[in-house]
Amino acid sequence: MERGLIPEDVINRIRDRADIVEIIGAHLSLSKAGQHYKGLCPFHSEKTPSFTVSPSRQMFHCFGCGEGGNVFTFLMKIEGASFPTVVRNLGEKLGIRVEDKPTSPAAKERAELAERLVALNRAAAEFFHQALLTDPAAEPARTYLRERGITAETIERFGIGYAPQGWDSLLKALTKAGKADKTQWTVEDVAAAGLVVPREQGSKKPGDASGYYDRFRGRVILPIRDLQKRVIGFGGRVLDDSVPKYLNSPETPLFRKGRTLYGLELARDGIARADQAVIVEGYFDAIAMHQAGLTNVIATLGTALTPEHIEVIRRFTRRVVLLFDPDAAGVRAALRTLDLFLGSGLAVQVGSLPAGEDPDTFVRSRGAEAFTTLMQKAPSLLDFTVQGSLTTDRQGSVEERVRCVEEVLALLQKLSNPVEKAAALRHVADHLGMDEKVLLERYRSLPRKASVGDEISSVQPETPLPKDEEVLVRLLLHEKLTPDMTAQFVADDFTDPRARRLMTLMLEGRNADGGIAIGELITRVQDDSLCGGVVRALSLSELPYDDAGAAFRESLKTLKLRRIVEEIQEIKTAQVAAERAGHAETVRTLLVRQNALQQERQRLLGAGPLPLTEVGSVNA
């Protein structure tokens, strides 16, 4: 995990002071479950809570998908932020000052560029906003906003601005401001932020402002912010019939259009309260909804939804309403979206407005309550798609009606859950008004599609450890082993590489008396790429042994016996090779070792059987 510019002792202080239950509880609903807290995992689809948070261990782990870590890991995943950013933001909330330390030149350069771009975007947003409020040339923009019913309060809340018509008004303002306040913003900085464009002709030498012109000119400007409320890009809307009507910032080190949803930083609380997100297509549709008090509305940035958008939405809600036009284009858009949402675990509805209305005009003319009622009555995404297909291509025969929804059936093949798939097929049959068997026959005749089950979550559960190794690891992590017990461990006796690495780290970390600080060990290895998942899963699970000592002895004996058997087999193989090569001394040495191992095996077997407590497998 990249530590960036932050000293390790500062990271540890912030982690120790943070309350992981409080921080995670601000993002999803948690309920007390014994010593831990549980909730629905925000990183994969599930109906039964398997996401576990431990206040004593200060870590989380999902027993369904294997995601887990500490408070920093969670915030990085949920906010899509870098490790240094998460640490700095959390340190600021906890009153711990975060100072930088030297790092590699490349990492330092990236961090400095990101900080410059954040400050530069903030200054650009302020420039645009002040231009809207005070520039006489911005009167057409102020008139446009008034005609759309946008209030002064909303303008302030969303930071709406105006880009002057001049070719380099913003460029001059930023480079001048940079020199004035010693931030030294260069033309290259402004270009890196996507705020200027190279001229096709003329000078393009580095640092020569005459080689660039402002990207946004003569447009209403809408700052785009991330979940930390930092300005990361801009959208601009023309005031006449020019094209394109809307213009967005290009991809930059801060801005990724395929991951960003407009207004989410303001809507996240409203989404949590409503337990639902409404997704519209335009900036001003979202702004109008918020102004009307509908604060769970977000917008795409003029592009189709992406898998990354879905992952972002899943962090905040499991219920989504999309707005599509009930025409052929809307049905095609719904088909593409159905493919995207299949298997995501999100309950998706599709809202349709009366002809000639968009969310902005609808809510202004009929009010927020009418809009909410319309959304509550919205059909499911599957219903909308099937019904829309039938409406756009009504034919007489059953065969022709089935053919018009073959795209839907092809998409349903991607469902990995057989119960969900069967229910969806019955649902489609009901809408078609036909025998389910006929539809099923048609469905089975279609070319097979790959399941999306493995595409929804990039993290899959790991296989459990061998039973004896799992018992020993579990006993260790639950602090049930004495120094004399752990002294009998040999890391190479463990066959699973995850257990072997954990034991290696444990043995290396013993103090002079042979003792182990288990809490420190868990903190140190819970994010380890190899054994972190096992450590989190077993340390947060219950200890199922009535007699920990008996479980230890029998598991250790099983571990030793298995290792002895493996080594005897290795010796036999080496012995055959030595005999063929005529190496008599090597053969004698191997026989001595083999006899010693056989005697140790007989000694262990003669110790008498001890019943090994059955241990259920866990997803680590």
Image (spheres, rainbow, N blue to C red):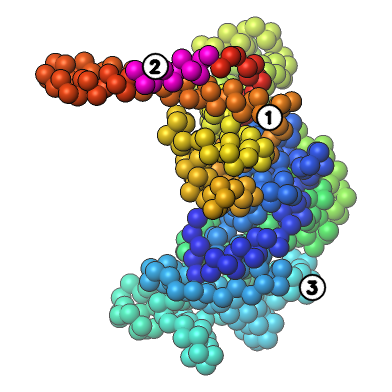
Residue identifier under label 1: 548
Type of amino acid at the residue the image marks with label 3 = Glu
Q: Which residue is mark 3?
A: 153
- Image quadrant containing the C terminus: top right
* Kind of element beneath mark 1: helix
> Where residue 598 is drawn, which disc sits there?
2
Q: Secondary structure at mark 2?
A: helix
The answer to which of marks 1 and 3 sits earlier in the sequence is 3
Left or right of 551? Residue 585 is left
- Distance from the alpha carbon under mark 3 to that under mark 2: 84 Å
Instruction: Judge whether residue 236 is colored magenta.
Output: no
- Chain-order first, disc 3 or disc 2: 3
Query: Magenta stretch?
Result: 595-606
Judging depth in this view, the residue of 476 and 323 nearest the camera is 476
Instruction: Give coordinates of residue 564: x percent, y percent.
Output: 41, 22
**Tally of marks:** 3
Residue at image point 70% right, 16% down = 426
Is 587 situated left or right of 270 in this image? left
